Image (cartoon, rainbow, N blue to C red):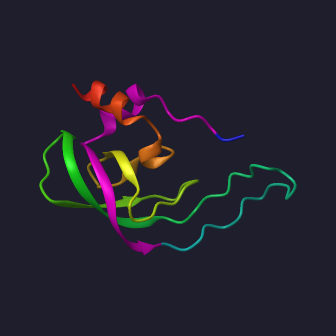
C-alpha cells in the first residue's frame, strides 16, 4: 500500500519557495534506482523512479521570491513527471522538490490557503 502524503503543515516550514507552476522541460533523468529486496509477488514493493532535473514555468509565487523559469531537482520517488505536469511545487533552499508525490501531494487550493 502506498504511503499517504506527509501533512502539509509538516513540510511547509521546509519550503524556501512555493510556486504554482507547470513542467516546461525535463532536462535530465537519473539512473533507475535498484529494485528493493522485497518478494516479487508484493503489489507495492517500494520501487522508486529515477531523479529528474526539471525546468518549471512559474505562473505564481505563493511563498518566497522568484522570477522566470525555475530549475529544480525531483529526487528519486514513486512518481515521474513529464512536460505539462502542473500544480503546487514546494521547493527547499537547494531547489529540491518536497513532497512524496510532487505537485500531486497536496491540492493547489490547500497550499494557497496555507501560504496566506
Q: Which residues lie in the magenta part?
A: 3-29
Depth check, front residue: 78 or 11:
78
Query: How many numbered dots are placed on residues in this image?
Result: 0
**Residue 61 at x, y = what percent?**
19, 43
Given residues 76 and 81, the one toward you in this image is: 81
> Residue at point 45% right, 64% down?
82
Q: Is residue 94 left or right of residue 98?
A: left
In the rendering, at what x and y percent does residue 81 appear? 47, 60
- Residue 85 screen position, x and y as percent: 41, 56
Residue drawn at (47%, 28%), measured in percent from left and top?
7
Q: Residue lying furthest front in this view? A: 84
Q: Is residue 37 above or below residue 61?
A: below
Instruction: Tell me if residue 54 comes above or below residue 108 in the rendering.
Output: below
Figure quadrant of the N terminus:
top right
**Residue at x 72% of width, y 59% of height:** 36
Does the segment drawn in magenta span residue 75? no
Quarter of the rendering occupied by the C terminus: top left
- 85 and 75: which is toward the camera: 85
Where residue 31 appears, as percent x and y from the top left, is 54, 74
Image quarter for residue 20? top left
Amino acid at each position: 500500500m502506498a504511503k499517504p502524503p506527509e501533512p502539509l503543515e509538516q513540510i511547509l516550514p521546509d519550503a524556501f519557495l512555493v510556486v504554482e507552476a507547470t513542467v516546461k522541460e525535463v532536462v535530465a533523468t537519473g539512473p533507475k534506482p535498484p529494485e528493493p529486496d522485497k518478494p516479487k509477488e508484493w503489489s507495492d514493493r517500494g520501487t522508486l523512479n529515477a531523479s529528474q532535473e526539471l525546468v518549471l514555468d512559474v505562473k505564481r509565487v505563493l511563498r518566497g521570491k522568484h522570477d522566470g523559469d525555475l530549475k529544480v531537482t525531483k529526487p528519486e520517488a514513486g512518481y515521474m513527471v513529464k512536460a505539462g505536469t502542473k500544480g503546487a511545487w514546494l521547493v527547499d533552499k537547494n531547489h529540491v522538490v518536497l513532497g512524496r508525490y510532487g505537485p500531486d501531494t497536496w491540492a493547489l487550493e490547500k497550499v494557497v490557503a496555507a501560504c496566506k
